[in-house]
Amino acid sequence: MLHKLFWLPLVLIIFLVFGIFSTSSATPVTINYTADNLVRGWYKIGDVSNPLPLGAHYDNWRFADQFTFDLEHQLWQLIWQAENSDCINSKPNNPGGFLAEVSITSGFAMNSTLSSSQWEVACVPQCLELPSDWDSLSWTTATEWGRNNDPTKIWYRVNKGAVQGISGNAQWIWTEANFDMQGAPGPGDSVFIRATIYPAPEPSTCMLLLFGIVGTLGMMYVKSKPQH
């Protein structure tokens, strides 16, 4: 009888775990971002391309804007359109940059995707309208220009600290050319920043959780058996 008391909860937990991951239709995602100098637009792309409202701080890089919404369990892309609006006076102390943190709550855990060289960027002239096919842009690997919490970087120095609400390990990213470098985006040019996320819990994570539960209950069962 005793072993049944142990294996019955195990069966119930297995159904509960797989029920959570199979029936849950959406994952909460929180996004914090800012851009130097401003964000002209941003988009959530899954089944269709959906423009999203700009935050109150779209033109003030010192403050991050935050949005939280649910994403269905599939591959998604988040795309921002940013501009270094003062790059007509381009010089070493007037860079363009983008900074973001995407926090995903999956099952029982939370993980964050930080802006870094694993994100992508595309630079287009100001006369180009928004593309109907985002993949038509010439996407390249983003260039990192320093962490949010790096006191040697201009954003930290000017702001007298890191931008609040975004991880200190998130990188300011931009195109390959920045500051007064030849080929840097010109006045009014748009820089598109793309992050690809997959909010669904990874199968390996689910299996590790299940094995952990099985192992724990198994040890409890062994310890509960009478010793001969």
Image (cartoon, rainbow, N blue to C red):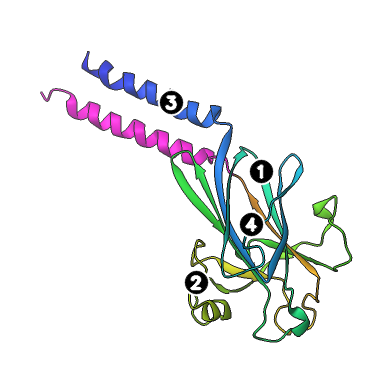
Q: Which residue is mark 4?
A: 55
Q: Position of residue 91 (x, y in %)?
A: 70, 86
Q: Is tag 1's residue or tag 4's residue first in the polypeptide sequence?
A: 4
Q: Which mark is residue 75?
A: 1
In this rendering, the label closer to the viewer, 3 or 2: 2
Residue 86, quarter of the rendered image: bottom right
- Residue at point 85% right, 50% down? 132
- Of the two numbered discs 2 and 1 in the rendering, the one whose residue sits closer to the viewer: 2
User: How busy is the neighbourhood of tag 4: few (under 14 within 10 Å), some, or many (20 plus)?
Assistant: some
Secondary structure category for the residue under label 4: loop
Q: Amino acid at mark 4?
A: Gly
Looking at the rendered structure, the kind of residue marked 1 is: Leu
Element carrying mark 1: loop
Whichever of callouts 2 and 1 sits on the residue coming sooner in the sequence is: 1
Q: Is residue 181 visible?
A: no
Across and down, in percent, residue 183 comes to 80, 79
Distance between mark 2 and mark 1 Cα atoms: 31 Å
**Mark-to-mark CA distance, 2 and 4:** 19 Å
- Label 3 to label 1: alpha-carbon separation: 25 Å
Residue type highlighted by circle 2: Ala
Which span of residues is magenta-colored?
199-228
Q: Secondary structure at mark 2?
A: loop
Q: What residue is disc 3 on?
A: 16
Would residue 227 be counted in the magenta stretch? Answer: yes
The answer to whether marks 3 and 2 mark residues whose Cβ atoms lie closer than 8 Å is: no
Give the labeled residue for mark 2. 162
Residues under labels 3 and 2: Cα distance?
Answer: 41 Å
Front residue of 36/200: it is: 36
Residue 31 lies, with reference to residue 176, above or below; the image says above
